[in-house]
Image (cartoon, grey):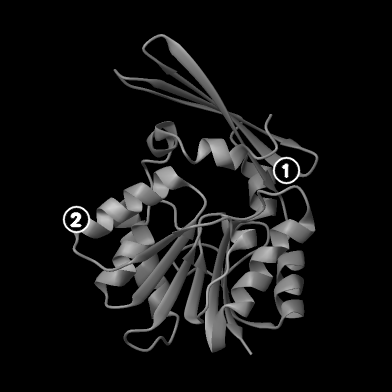
Amino acid sequence: MMKDWYIQWFDTDEYLDVYKHRNEKDAECHIKFLLSQIDLPSGASILDMACGAGRHSILLAKLGYKVTGVDLSKRLLSEAKLSAERENLSVKFILSDIREFNIDRKFDLVLNLFTSFGYFETDEENFQLFYKAYSLLNSNGYFVFDYFNRNYLLKNLIPYSSEFNEDYAIIQERKIVDGRVIKKITINRNGNSKLYYESVKLYESNLLVTKLKEIGFEIVKLFGDFSGNKFEENSSPRFIAICRKK
């Protein structure tokens, strides 16, 4: 398995096939919920870290916010730029690894959604994202961090799933290895088979809270899903932290 699996995987058309269920309707619900929890001024500046194909960035720009999206995938950013052009929206999309990303401005809100965290080999590399978010925020700015809940995942991991249609078959196999959730993705199309991997470090919620506070964030609210349910360590599917820079 490639160490830098995300570089190859996120630049494929197959990635969009596997995650096509992450649709605009879901994104609208998520953004509506998050904005209901945050006191943002009109026209606020927002950074979407690991913006992918730009679903959330586009929706926020439609609402009149000044949006910047950053991602390391040329393929996904091309989709994001096309979407912005179709909607006649001005969104600044930047190609960069989060660890190396720098910009000469600050933001009122930084978003990191859908477990775009834990990809790297070391804790130091992974937690760079928290430090980066803090450094890029205005005073009293917000950071929203959305990650799977480790305890829930350990109890509810689905080892095998498959999807078939007339064009392709997608087989996904999942297991826990050395504190990481490893996903093997096999895609069969037109008699050809392609193999990809995902590997994400599992962090306990208590450690995440400790680290956020250590960096200087005030944790305003913790949710266990995008319906607004309170975070419960053993039963919540997600860990959604709404934080503020002190």
Residue 180: mark: 1
Q: Residue at x 51, y 82 (%)?
A: 106
Counting from the top left corner in percent of width and height, residue 135 is at: 63, 78
For the C terminus, the quadrant is bottom right
Per the image, label 2 sits on a secondary structure element best described as helix
Three-letter amino acid code at the position of disc 2:
Arg
Residue 227: mark: none
> What is the distance, in whole Å, between disc 2 and disc 1 at their CAs?
39 Å
Q: Is residue 29 visible?
A: no
Q: Is residue 33 above or below residue 160?
A: below
Q: Is residue 209 visible?
A: yes
What residue would you read off at disc 2?
Answer: 86
Packing grade of label 2 (10 A; few <14, some 14-19, many >=20) is few
Q: Is residue 33 above or below residue 120?
A: below
Give the mark nearer the N terminus: 2 vs 1: 2
Per the image, label 1 sits on a secondary structure element best described as strand
